[in-house]
Image (tube, grey):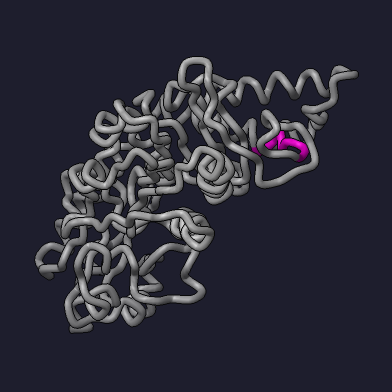
Amino acid sequence: MRHYMEVEFGNEGSRTHEYGSRVKQAVQRARDLVGGVVHANRDEVIFTSGATESNNLAILGLRAHGVASGKRHVISTRIEHKAVLEPVEVLEKEGFEVTWLDADADGQVSVEALTSSLRPDTLLVSVMAANNETGVIQPIQEMAEVLKGHPVYFHTDSAQAFGKELDLLRNPRIDLISCSGHKLYAPKGIGALIVRKRGYHRVPLTPLLFGGGQERGLRPGTLPVPLIAAFGKACELAIRDHVARRRRCLEIRASAKMALDPLQPRYHGCEESTLPHVLNLAFPGLDSEALIVALKDLVAISNGSACTSSDYTPSHVIQAMGFDPDQANEAIRISWCHLSPAVDWVGLASRIQSLR
């Protein structure tokens, strides 16, 4: 990032001088690296400010096509991030019919429920790759197989899984993939929408912003070359170090569970289908807000998405899994990465026990 801020600071859109040409090569290399995470081509990578913008472009960008084609049915889930829930709700207010799928007690959405909800006029299926609160990985591959015989567009918010669950997103039946760079340790403020072609046909998206022809006309504005170059490098490192990072995250998970299991917490999500760096759990009788305050000198934890933490309500994700609001109020999310410093899990468990 610093190199393209301090040394090569040209505008990627400038075609008349060498400064622009050099940074254009850096952007194209970054497209290759970002696309390579999911086996997409460079011309299928649209740079955005992050997964929130990508989700909006994927969902609302199909609105005009849905109206023109008479396909006004959308399928999504109640455990989605607000960056999917709210754009889908916009379509719903405009007359689109939405089928909302719940998750089971393990946090997964049923493939059978998706299959039974499909209709000839279904325009879009949007299911997240892995949940941002529970870490539960959704059966994206199985859903992609179900959709093979249907013309519906398949979108996945992969902010949590991109560059971490590599095989999950490489199925060519997934048309639209949203991702954020900062989830892979790139700077905040950069992301992408992967828009896969079907043969020679592109997904019929229309832009949400206007004022330039950048990013194949879908996202106008001068490209942030330093952020893009850093995102590409982060993707390269994510693939290179995937095994080591995963191993370290699993080691931290094992240490945490060894200390916390004797307290008999209620875990939210099946461990076999959960990202290795996330635990969502509750200690019955302990309010999550009180727990966060009591533990703040030991760990930084949360009770929901960072995007909704300023206006806290019981987790819609936990409630969609069948838990009541009081149980949802007890849920906390602990997450880490391969770079996280050591935690005194035994001391943490002792502090929690003292609060009971």
At x 43%, y 21%, the residue is 39
Q: Position of residue 32 (x, y in %)?
A: 55, 21
Q: Nearer the viewer, residue 179 or 54?
A: 54
Residue 24, quarter of the rendered image: top right
Q: Residue furthest right?
A: 16
Q: Is residue 226 magenta?
A: yes
Q: Position of residue 99 (x, y in %)?
A: 33, 54
Q: Nearer the viewer, residue 103 or 170?
A: 103
Residue 27 falls left or right of residue 283: right
Decide: is 283 above or below 226. below
Q: Number of labelled discs?
A: 0
Q: Quadrant of the N terminus?
A: top right
Q: Specify start and end residues of the magenta stretch as a single range.
A: 221-227
At x 30%, y 51%, the residue is 135
Q: Is residue 302 magenta?
A: no
Residue 314, quarter of the rendered image: bottom left
Does the rendering let one see residue 255?
yes
Residue 215 falls left or right of residue 126: right
Q: Nearer the viewer, residue 186 or 344?
A: 186
Does the rendering let one see residue 1?
no
At x 64%, y 31%, the residue is 229
Residue 98 falls left or right of residue 13: left
Residue 269 falls left or right of residue 85: left
Q: Position of residue 297 (x, y in %)?
A: 40, 72
Q: Position of residue 302 (x, y in %)?
A: 38, 67
At x 43%, y 76%, the residue is 312
Decide: is 154 above or below 97. above
